[in-house]
Image (cartoon, rainbow, N blue to C red):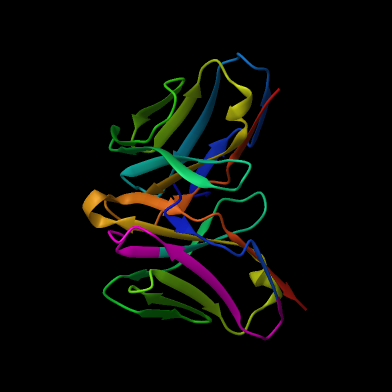
């Protein structure tokens, strides 16, 4: 009965590959997010979707493409992976306009 | 440019004593502040928050203080327990630019020594 779940938990891949990370929330929230935590532990928002509609899109390379098939899911697809993409990626969800966000356990991506 | 800063990367406190974690921000538009707690290999979990119309919010052992003029907030944990050992993130948002857009600090690792 995990509230926000992500798969996979760990992802190791080669430069140039394309990979996806899946996120699902069962909290009934309208808004979902992707964050990146880099090696300096800086947690920064990448995208936010509300009811499948993009509402925040920070400066992120267009190799990153979020996809929201329904309001309970927000997947992150990354094309042509680069070494600098290595990080921990967190999915989160919240009610619309609510400040409190609920985070998933994170996906540690390592690009070799 | 980091708008939320936690200048102490780590803090060690004896069990039973008070832990004080600090956070500074630069954006005067921020009007809502949150603290998150993170254990290894888990996502951050919401701990406590405060609106800019207040200067204090208390929830059990956790109290957050906000000093708007100094653009500073702090989290007090009293008494500290070994289970409080974790990384604590401060976050802020501005309702005018979207309450959902949280800006996080880099975290302070708290170690409570039994």
Figure disc tally: 0
Q: Is residue B93 left or right of residue B60?
A: left
Is residue B29 rendered magenta in the image? yes
Residue B36, position as x, y percentages in the image = 50, 61
Please say whether residue B99 is visible from this viewpoint.
yes
Camera sees residue A99: no
Q: From the top left corner, tell me how far across and down residue B29 is, in percent.
A: 27, 59
Which residue occupies the extreme right position in the image? B114
> In terms of depth relative to the viewer, which is nearer, B55 or A96?
B55
**Residue at x 45% of width, y 65% of height:** B24
The answer to whether residue B79 is above or below residue A61 is below
As for residue A97 lying within the magenta part, the answer is: no
Which one is nearer the viewer's eye here, A98 or A59? A59
Question: Taking A53 as reference, is B36 left or right?
Answer: right
Q: Residue at x 29, y 70 (%)?
A: B52
Q: Position of residue B43 (x, y in %)?
A: 56, 50
A105 with respect to B74 (left or right): right
Taking the image as shown, residue A41 lies to the left or right of residue A92, namely: right
Q: Quadrant of residue A112?
A: top right
In this view, which residue lies farthest toward the left? B96
Task: Write the start and end of the magenta stretch as one range.
Answer: B13-33
Residue A40 % position (x, y):
61, 46
Q: Quick one: quadrant of the C terminus of chain B?
A: bottom right
Against B76, is A107 above or below? above
Residue shown at 66% from the left, 49% from the top: B41
Q: Nearer the viewer, residue A5 or B42?
A: B42
> B75 above or below A79?
below
């Amino acid at each position: 009965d995990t509230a926000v779940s992500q798969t996979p938990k760990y992802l190791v891949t080669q430069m140039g590959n394309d990979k996806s990370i899946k996120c699902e929330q069962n909290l009934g929230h309208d808004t979902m997010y992707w964050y990146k935590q880099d090696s300096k532990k800086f947690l920064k928002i990448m995208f936010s979707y509300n009811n499948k509609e993009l509402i925040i899109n920070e400066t992120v390379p267009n190799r990153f493409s979020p996809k929201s098939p329904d309001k309970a899911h927000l997947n992150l697809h990354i094309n042509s992976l680069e070494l600098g993409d290595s990080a921990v990626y967190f999915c989160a969800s919240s009610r619309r306009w609510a400040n409190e966000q609920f985070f998933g356990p994170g996906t540690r991506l390592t690009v070799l | 440019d980091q708008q939320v800063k936690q200048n102490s990367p780590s803090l060690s406190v004896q069990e039973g004593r008070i832990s004080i974690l600090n956070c500074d921000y630069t954006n005067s538009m921020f009007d809502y502040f949150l603290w998150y707690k993170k254990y290894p290999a888990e996502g951050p979990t919401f701990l406590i928050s405060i609106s800019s119309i207040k200067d204090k919010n208390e929830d059990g052992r956790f109290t957050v203080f906000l000093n708007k003029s100094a653009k500073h907030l702090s989290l007090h944990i009293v008494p500290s327990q070994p289970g409080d050992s974790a990384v604590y993130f401060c976050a802020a948002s501005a309702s005018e630019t979207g309450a959902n857009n949280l800006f996080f600090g880099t975290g302070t690792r708290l170690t409570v020594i039994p």
